[in-house]
Amino acid sequence: MDIEETIYKYALTNAIEHGNKCQVGSVIGMVMSKNPEMRKDPKTVSQLAGKLVAKVNNLTPEEQQKEVESLGGLEQHAKKEEKPKGLPELKNTEDKKVTLRFAPNPSGPLHIGHARAAILNKLYQEKYNGKLILRIEDTDPKRVEPDAYDAIPQDIKWLGIEPDEIYTQSDRLEIYYEYAQKAIEIGAAYMCKCDGGEFKKLKDNCQPCPCRSHTIEENMELWNNFENMEEGEAVLRIKTDINHKNPAIRDWVAMRIVNQEHPRLGNKYKIYPMMNFSVTVDDHLMGMTHVLRGKDHLANSEKQTYLYKHFGWDVPEFIHYGRLKMDDVELSTSKAREGIENKTYTGWDDPRLGT
Ligand SMILES: [Zn+2]
């Protein structure tokens, strides 16, 4: 079949499939996708298509049918490749028990974004016959809603999820202290007494602060005296790359003082880990192989990788999924709380909320 015949057949097919009228654009598209060699000569293709489409559109439906039969029947369309259904495979699942976690903050009731994370983890747990850990991350006493301690496990159960293990981070502060001290001892962390604004100015200019050159002994002395300090007086920082292209990743804070009664611990502790520190220590100690989290955690994954490398630990596979957005539904817990307080919403069960 020569080019002209080929295009004629496409035009007839297109007409018969679309109420006996064909479109030049569709015919050209069909030619280009089925005959890549013709892409080199678009001018000829479009001239021929224009001429033949006009010819086909002047034929009666019966004539179109007769013509296409004389050319061997309707042109078959290329089969569309089917997208694989179900969950994509996880990388690096050989020779290990796939271990995953769902780790919400108890800052309010769970919402649909949490449900998605929890269900994804559960489905992967089933797919790989793995282990699923529920970890309640309550190391920021200012962001703990006491009711959430009971509500979270209930909501998880309602979703049909039975975690293999459950942890609450506020039970584990001593563990974080132990690893903070280890980080100081291996020279991976330092106590920084700089004023926050001052430190930021230096950091934004890729300058180390004077505390970065403390000796291990100086750091240990400050660490041992940490508890007697006031909120904001000092922090423990993890050394990263002071020239890192993202300023947020440069020497991030691992531990700080929080002057606030903790709903579970009362005033027993003052030193609290930042999320990136406690999460890394726990993910390592709990044997996490795969960490599913939102794309908004990309920088956190990078921060945490520094700590894994300092300690010589295996880095889990980080998988970042897209953000869940719903029109007209408020998914932010803090905005929802604000709206409930000012009576914009009737309560956590208001249908305009993601909860
Ligand atoms: Zn400093």
Image (tube, rainbow, N blue to C red):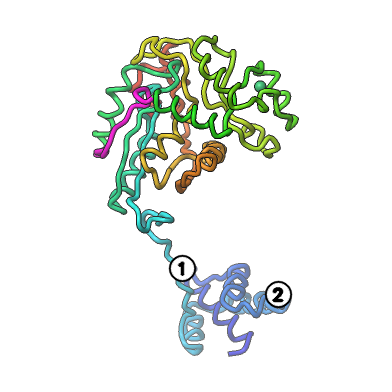
Q: Is mark 2 within 8 Å of ligand 1?
A: no
Quarter-of-image position of residue 11: bottom right
Circle 2 packing at 10 Å, graded few (<14), some (14-19), many (20+), is few
Label of residue 80 in the image: 1
Q: Is residue 207 left or right of residue 30?
A: right
Residue neighbourhood size for the residue with mark 1, other residues' Cα within 10 Å, grouped as few (<14), some (14–19), many (≥20): few
The quadrant in which the N terminus is found is bottom right
Task: Determine which residue is flagged by label 2.
Answer: 42
- The mark found on residue 4 in the picture is none
Nearer to us: label 2 or label 1: 1
Are the residues at dot 2 and dot 1 in contact (C-beta closer than 8 Å)?
A: no
Whether ligand 1 has any atom under 8 Å from the Cβ at mark 1 is answered as no
Q: Observer-nearest residue: 146 or 50? A: 146
Q: Give the range drawn in magenta.
A: 160-172
Q: Is residue 167 magenta?
A: yes
State whether residue 312 appears in this view: yes
Q: Does the magenta stretch include residue 231?
A: no
Side of 289 where 217 appears, left or right: right
Q: In this view, does 272 lie above or below 309?
A: above
The quarter of the image holding the C terminus is top left
Q: Residue at x 52, y 14 (%)?
A: 225
Q: Is residue 123 left or right of residue 140?
A: left
User: Where's residue 181, x and y in %?
Assistant: 49, 27
From this viewpoint, is residue 319 visible? no
The answer to which of marks 2 and 1 sits earlier in the sequence is 2
Instruction: Please state the total of marks drawn on the protein image.
Output: 2
Mark 1 falls on what kind of element?
A: loop
